[in-house]
């Protein structure tokens, strides 16, 4: 018994000494952070991609927050873990001028979260398409050692994501001339204001409702009736070049 009582203080002292020498736990073993879109999915979700396009053309304000999903390959931890993002080589957009990081945290007990990037409308966006190459870099919580992948002869990195931003009028990917007619910025903005077209979502996968042909048909018909009503009321709608606004041949010839 005396021997046990003698050993107990020694054991406690040893444990305390070990704790004093132990480094701060950083939760970095086996935790690799990456942009979720590069992983790709199955079913109805989009194939792997590493970029998005954004235009302020459809935005009335001067700022917008862009959500970019991120994931962690590893174990969830009971603490919030910040991750680091820098502007990679080749970026023409600048942090502080064109955008900033609004939030870059993997919340406690989670393996999936969102990088929020705040975009600022600037004068140079009216004439230029700017690029920000967002690069995840290692820190005390995360590694970025996941190898790039090849998809359809393209190399898609897991730790670099490109944001193309402008304020110029860009024709959406799914704009159908046969229904909407010749693309103009004024027409696209009017359709957005009147009928809720989300052409901005149409720039990026999985694309917006405009990619649904039923939505395209009904929306184009509604816009055509609006233009006819305005014409009948003696207040026709004109494009910025002075020509009368019209819809596509599939709609106009019905």
Image: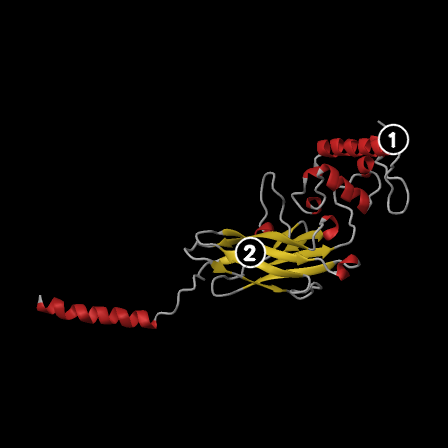
Front label number (1 vs 2):
1
Residue corresponding to mark 1: 232
Task: Locate residue 57, reporting x and y percent.
Answer: 75, 50
Quadrant including the C terminus: top right
Measure how far apart labels 1 and 2 are at the Cα level. 56 Å
**Earlier along the polypeptide chain: callout 1 or callout 2?**
2
Task: Locate residue 142, reporting x and y percent.
Answer: 49, 61
Which is nearer the eye, 159 or 212? 212
Task: Locate residue 14, reporting x and y percent.
Answer: 25, 71
Left or right of 124 on screen, residue 1: left
Kindly identify the residue that appears in the image at 66 percent across and 66 percent down: 89
Dot 2: what SS?
Answer: strand
Quadrant including the N terminus: bottom left
Which is nearer the eye, 141 or 128? 128
Instruction: Say which mark, if any, is on residue 34.
Output: 2
- In this rendering, the answer to whether 57 lies above or below 11 is above
Task: Locate residue 157, reporting x and y percent.
Answer: 61, 57
Quarter of the rendering containing residue 116 = bottom right
Dot 1: what SS?
Answer: helix
Kindly identify the residue that appears in the image at 55 percent across and 57 percent down: 103
Quarter of the rendering containing residue 167 = bottom right
Q: Residues within 10 Å of mark 2 (few under 14, many from 20)?
A: many
Left or right of 141 on screen, residue 14: left
Q: Residues within 10 Å of mark 1 (few under 14, many from 20)?
A: few
Quarter of the rendering containing residue 207 = top right
Instruction: Say which mark, if any, is on residue 112.
Output: none
């Amino acid at each position: 018994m005396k021997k046990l009582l003698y050993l107990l203080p020694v054991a406690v002292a040893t444990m305390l000494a070990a704790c004093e020498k132990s480094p701060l736990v950083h939760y970095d073993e086996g935790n690799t952070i990456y942009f979720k879109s590069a992983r790709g999915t199955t079913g109805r979700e989009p194939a792997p991609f590493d970029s998005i396009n954004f235009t302020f053309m459809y935005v009335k304000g001067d700022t917008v927050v862009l959500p970019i999903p991120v994931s962690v390959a590893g174990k969830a931890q009971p603490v919030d873990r910040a991750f680091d993002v820098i502007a990679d080589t080749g970026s023409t957009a600048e942090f502080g001028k064109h955008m900033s990081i609004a939030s870059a945290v993997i919340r406690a007990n989670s393996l999936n979260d969102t990088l929020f990037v705040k975009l600022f409308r600037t004068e140079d966006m009216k004439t230029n398409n700017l690029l920000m190459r967002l690069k995840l870099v290692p820190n005390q919580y995360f590694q970025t050692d996941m190898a790039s992948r090849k998809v359809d002869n393209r190399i898609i990195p897991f730790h670099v994501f490109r944001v193309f931003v402008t304020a110029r009028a860009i024709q959406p990917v799914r704009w159908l001339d046969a229904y909407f007619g010749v693309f103009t910025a004024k027409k696209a903005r009017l359709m957005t204001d009147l009928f809720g077209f989300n052409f901005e979502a149409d720039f990026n996968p999985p694309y917006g409702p405009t990619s649904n042909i039923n939505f395209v048909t009904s929306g184009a018909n509604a816009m055509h009736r609006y233009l006819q009503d305005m014409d009948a009321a003696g207040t026709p709608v004109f494009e910025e070049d002075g020509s009368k606004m019209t819809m596509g041949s599939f709609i106009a010839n019905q």
